[in-house]
Amino acid sequence: MSKILLHGTEAICEGAIRNGCRAFFGYPITPQNEVPEYMSANMPKIGGVFVQAESEVAAINMVYGAAGAGVRAMTSSSSPGVSLKQEGISYIACARIPCVIVNIMRAGPGLGGILPAQGDYFQATKGGGHGDYHLIVLAPSSVQEACDFTYLAFDLSDKYRVPAMILADGMIGQLMEPVELPPMRALSDIPKKEWATDGRFGEKRRVLNSLIIKPEELEPHVNEMQKTYEEIAKTEKRAEKYMTEDAEIVITAYGTVARICKSAANTLRKEGIKAGVIRPITLYPFPSEAYEEAAKGADAFLSVELSLGQMVEDVRLAVNGKKPVYFYGRTGGNVMDESEIVAAAKNALNKARAGK
Amino acid sequence: MAKVFEKTKMLTDTPLHYCPGCTHGIVHRLVAESIEELGLEDKAIGIAPVGCAVFAYDYFNCDMQEAAHGRAPAVATGIKRCLPDRLVFVYQGDGDLASIGMAETVHAAARGERITIIFINNSIYGMTGGQMAPTTLIGQKATTCQNGRDPAVNGYPIRVCELLATLDAPYYIERVSTHDVKHVLAAKKAIKKALRFQAEDRGYSFVEVLVSCPTNWHMNPVDALRFMAEETSKTFPLGVYRDKSAGME
């Protein structure tokens, strides 16, 4: 297969379209406007639905309706807009409606800034809205992965009836890279959804609902959701390990930041320091086993993020006190360069060896 | 014995939870009967709101989705755009539709979504215990305006039919009432028309139905009906606010 040069947002759209997404609902916000723009141009060509919603709130509820009717549906936004969607995501999670939500993260909090950030990790992985629920969260670090993970997200979401999120930083939204596109999947190839409310009358009618007013019914329902998360944790954890086998210092980062970390690890190796990188691909479920394994040999871990320290909490839980875990982050839309990571890694290693 | 009446098969056998004297149940029946009479049972998908009608998904005997508070028109948009040959109906109260969901209400109408909205106006928040609604009448008492709605503090009631009638897209908008048999029959006619217009792919249809709330108005059911006839319908005049079929049928 030949590769074509694609923008990260186009790759997300193609990954969706090629895996049967036939409904897109969105609202303008920088830096992800190219997603709804691409969908507005391309959905009608394949018999799909595009609606520019009146708000993020309306967009996610349109997804609720469309995905509830059995159609593969997606919405995209950037951080402040994803905050607005949280109500709808909580309802979707409870009603067990599969769908895909894309968050091209920008700097926050508040209106923040429009440049790349990773400050929405907690929101994406710990629930985000109210109540006990999780999303399947995939973090691409290249344009190819933006396409592949969006494609995968639809399958995982359908399989488990858990909404999936593509959590990408603003760099993915703006990059252009060569991509090999997956073939267009026939809609007839996508398993039929017996639970979907696509119009049925009488005894076998179906109801999609998140109101379970009797406590003796709500508890088993959320327990059932929890069981699904445990099953996902068993089968769907994904991480990339880069030179971790003999690493003294394990740097960890997700998304595009992991690419800078790999360059830093190469530089550190040239200087005689054995550095490796763990890049979580699924942020939920968090690939904790990769850290447990690395903790056997490494002296220290360093979590590098475009935030003030969010994923580092999951890294600490995974390492579970066996080795020290340090943090280096930038915010406000500033991206660290390789030399900053090299310095932070050396500093982490020194501290660990000094017992600090 | 000759059978003179039969419950519509578009309603389940679940007992309604509505308070004595509330006319929500009548409107459920009007909607259900209309769908059956139009022969659209197999095409109907309903959206339940948050509020007194939150359990509507237990009553309508078809596929149902329960929406978040105020979001029903957006949910309906998602379904109808993907399944344009289905009959998508939305059932919402005044807090849901005219307060928290006003943006979804106005924009679904402005886009001319081919859906039917049944808007229940009882000028109060019933389910939560009688708070002021966007449709509470001037002077009408509620738990959050205990001396009566004061325009200086609470503003004025919103007339949704009139507001939506400023938009170009809606095909049919009518306000009806349930305070006596004559008006219930007229309400049935309007609801059936609205659903038929959707089935004929003519456009967005909206029926506002005035409903009583004896419990939160602190009246007996008869006085509540009288109040609707004498007071509610003064603030919310009954009538057709848009009918693009006028003169065509």
Image (cartoon, coloured by chain):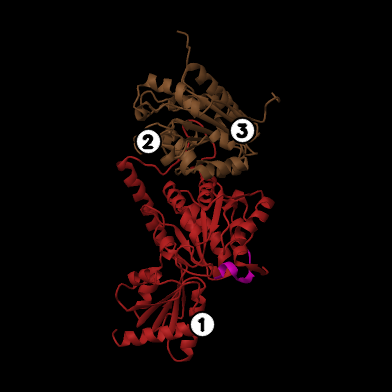
Q: Which residue is denoted by mark 2 in the rendering?
A: B127
Q: Badge 3: few (under 14), some or many (20 or more) residues near its Cα, within 10 Å?
A: many
Give the Cα distance between marks 1 and 3: 60 Å
Q: Badge 1: few (under 14), some or many (20 or more) residues near its Cα, within 10 Å?
A: some
Circle 3 SS class: helix
Q: Which chain is brown?
A: B
Of all residues, the one furthest to the top in this rendering is B1
Disc 3 residue type? Gln
Residue B173 visible (yes or no): yes
Q: Which residue is denoted by mark 1 in the rendering?
A: A263
| Above or below: residue A311 compared with residue A157 | below
Q: Are marks 1 and 3 on the same chain?
A: no
Q: Are marks 2 and 1 on the same chain?
A: no
What stretch of residues is rendered in magenta? Answer: A171-181
Q: Going by the image, does A254 lie left or right of A15? A: left
Identify the image quadrant of the C terminus of chain A.
bottom left
Position of residue A48 measured from the top left corner of the image (x, y, whole percent)? 63, 49
Q: Going by the image, does B135 lie left or right of A49? A: left
